[in-house]
Amino acid sequence: MTVTKAPAACLIGWPAAHSRSPLIHHYWLRTLGIAGGYVIEAVPPDDLRDFVLRLSLRGFVGANVTIPHKEGVLALSAPDARAKAVGAANTLWFADGELRSTNTDVEGFINNLDASAPGWDDSGEALVLGAGGSSRAVVFGLLERGFGRVHLANRTPARAAALAKQFGPNVHPLSWDGIDEVLPRAKLLVNTTSLGMHGQPPLEVDVAGLPQAAVVADLVYVPLVTPLLAAAKARGLKTADGLGMLLHQAVRGFELWFGRRPEVTAELRALVEADLTKT
């Protein structure tokens, strides 16, 4: 008798800090009635190559990748255009016997905006705060969606300039002091920095300078409603929070591993929200 083992995926990180990914994927496995698993694997940097190259032998159909391995897995897999442009991958899967990689932060960001603020991409310019890995995913997504002008502000101007050079003439580097000048023209404001997160300094940007039709997105999800989002809501602006992006970025990985496209539901969001508020 042949025993078929249920497919399983994992999260590769070091250290293996508490992640909401198992909660999200186990919810979808349960609600879709799929026999499968999802576990966290603590993989030291020195062991990354061996772990990834033996991923299938370890019984995994794919993996999520988190800090500090997002860049390292690019050389161990066949990255798609998104992973190459962002310079990091967060999802691994097998196709035609090949280990492939992508960055689902791009579609997580875009799909969350589509769900939270329909019409956000009608027209106008975008202002992105920060020039780290998350910013690269956001900028790539905005250009892919057709934004003709993306302003990129960073506290270290050289990083914004380097990122703008990477993405081409539609991305314009901006000094932090120049934010107020661009705000009145920004149809979309996106915070990709850690400013406003619990334990971090506040993000001192005055949303009063934005047009009334602007949309404000914050990738921070602890707290769920950051001071930036609270100020935007007080003005009646449409908003998209970091938890929504976290949930939407998980969709494609699940589909690649388990063959069904899951939905981001109010029930799932409430489940993760409850977990985030635990002490």
Image (cartoon, rainbow, N blue to C red):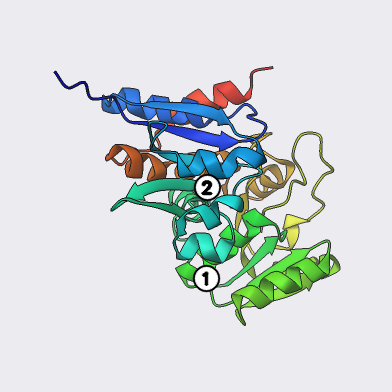
| Relative side of 192 to 19, left or right | right
Q: Which mark is residue 207?
A: none
- Name the residue nearer the viewer: 33 or 264: 33
Q: Dot 1: few (<14), some (14–19), or many (≥20) neighbours within 10 Å?
A: some
Q: The residue tagged with tag 1: helix, strand or loop?
A: helix
In terms of secondary structure, where does tag 2 sit?
A: loop
Q: Position of residue 269 (x, y in %)?
A: 48, 31
Identify whether 50 is placed above or below 77: above
Q: Which residue is mark 1?
A: 143
Q: Residue at x 72, y 58 (%)?
A: 130
> Which one is earlier in the sequence, the residue at label 1 or at label 2?
2
* Residue 231 on image: x %, y %: 71, 46
Numbered mark located on residue 90 in the image: 2
Amino acid residing under circle 1? Leu
Residue plotted at (68% across, 42% down)? 230
**Residue farthest along the bottom direction in this orientation:** 169
Query: Which label sits in the foreground, 1 or 2?
Result: 2
Q: Could you tell whether 151 is left or right of 64 in the image?
A: right
